[in-house]
Image (cartoon, rainbow, N blue to C red):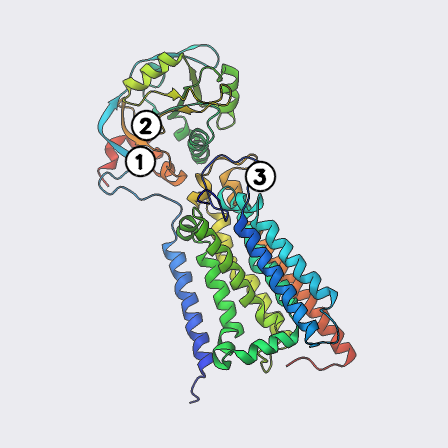
Amino acid sequence: MRKPSRSMRSCHLALSAVLIVLAGVACGGKDGSADLDDATGWYGSVLEKPVPKVDFSLRDTEGRPFEFASETEGSLTLLFFGYTNCPDICPIHLASIAAVMRDFPYELRSRIKVVFVSTDPERDTPERLRSWLDGFDESFVGLLGTVEQVNDIERSFGLAPSFVDPAQDSERYMVGHAAQVLAFTPDNLAHIAYPFGTRQSDWAKDLPRLAREGFGSGRER
Amino acid sequence: MKDIIWWCAARGVEWTWTWQAYPGVWLFVAGLVVAFFRLERRETDEALSDASSPSWRRTAFLVAAGALWLILDWPIGAIGAGYLASVHMVQFLVLALIAPPLLLLSIREEDYRALARRLPEGPFRAVTHPLVTLATFTIVLAATHWPPVVDTLMPSQAGNMLLDLVWLATGLLFWWPIVAPVPERRGWGYPMKIGYLIAATLVNTGTFAYLTFTALPLYATYELAPPFPGISTRDDQTLAGLLMKVGGAAILWTAITILFARWYRESERGEPTPA
């Protein structure tokens, strides 16, 4: 039998490497998800102490009063505080949730409510907020109140109140606000918060379980 | 000096059309230009050829250098680094498939032979063996589009520069058996070169399918980047996959067509097929 040349051996080695790498990519390729928290069984951050739903009332983008507790009763409710001029956190969170919800069947989508409370009443007019939310999903609820009202609500959920740095441009200012989305399950408690950086794959795995089975399903995994 | 951004990277800040300087890119492209014209001048001085480089050779180089500058500098470099995977794919196509053959074409045969004389023959033949170059291209293509690799490298200037240079180096290696006249290989004529390029059109199928048909965004870099107006993360990823397949195939089939035309012309003239 003829002995393979050095260059042929190099070729064989390289081809073997290709197969190993391709197999690794095919088998171990992640689908863009963050790591599952094995202790809790959820992709979001489980809160040490669940946050109870607070019964607040604000105006929606049509000017109607929106009673948070009663309007969201029985639904999985994602509550988020932000503003329409936000350059990153708000649009990324809302775009991710909207993209994932579009993949859900109607039955599941109808169990989920997304409530967005503006932290920038100066610039977020009802029309502007409605138009901005419609860019993500027309079912998203937009709420408006005074800065004091909204800050009180944030505090009641254990979130830091929003703030505007007074040194900034009076028209192009940024608003500091909580970056997490609180997920209230039908038991009227938020057991999980979703920080900035939550991937669509994380939402896609957690939301159906939270909406259909509630928070208790996480520990059974 | 500390605040200078030398190379594009994913910065996680809102996109603006405010111009940004990337001196590292300028130095890189300027280095290429200086190297080419020094080589060209040396050839003229030493009368290595009957005249300076033919204009097509200089044109090939200038197109390659211009394309590299265009895709590495602001705005394409910045958008590709931190906002859109589809623009990052355009960068890949230029770095790995368009600029390398043009750069290799801009080098004279005498210079290739001089280089070959300086290198140890065995390793040089092994590294530039078509199976090795195709395998390397396949490995690098798959590895550098794997989400953990992309998400690790893109946020840093050094990581992004490394990725760009690896793509360029891999492209040079991949095109070497097609363009470079050395080392000579028995039986490595037009039919084999055409077969090599056809094989290359197939090796990206796995990565293309992974990018195009995965429903959820694969890369945290682009998924969690401040939104770029006009395109969603998912559409951007699908477009990136399609660009890899369609754009890559268009480039490779253009090269196949050129090779076939040359082969046909030489056969008509009765010239022997290069061995």
Give SS at disc 3. Answer: loop
Dot 2 corresponds to which residue? Answer: A183
Of B76 and B273, which appears nearest the observer? B76
**Callout 1 touching callout 2 (CB < 8 Å):** yes
Quarter location, residue B66: bottom right
Measure the C-alpha gap from mark 3 to mark 1.
38 Å
**Callout 3 touching callout 1 (CB < 8 Å):** no
Residue located at (52% from left, 75% from top): B129
Query: Marks 3 and 2: which is nearer the front?
Result: 3
Q: Is residue B163 above or below residue B132?
A: above
* Mark 3 crowd level (few <14, some 14–19, many ≥20, 10 Å Cα): few
Of A48 and A213, which appears nearest the observer? A48
Residue located at (37% from left, 34% from top): A196
Quadrant including the C terminus of chain B: bottom right
Q: Position of residue B157 (x, y in %)?
A: 46, 49
Residue located at (43% from left, 32% from top): A101
Query: Marks 3 and 1: which is nearer the front?
Result: 3
Instruction: Kindly identify which chain the residue marked by label 3 belongs to.
Output: B
Quarter location, residue B75: top right
* Mark 2 crowd level (few <14, some 14–19, many ≥20, 10 Å Cα): many
* Mark 1 crowd level (few <14, some 14–19, many ≥20, 10 Å Cα): many
Dot 3 corresponds to which residue? Answer: B19
Q: Please report whichever mark, 1 or 2, sits nearer to the chain's N-terminal start.
A: 1
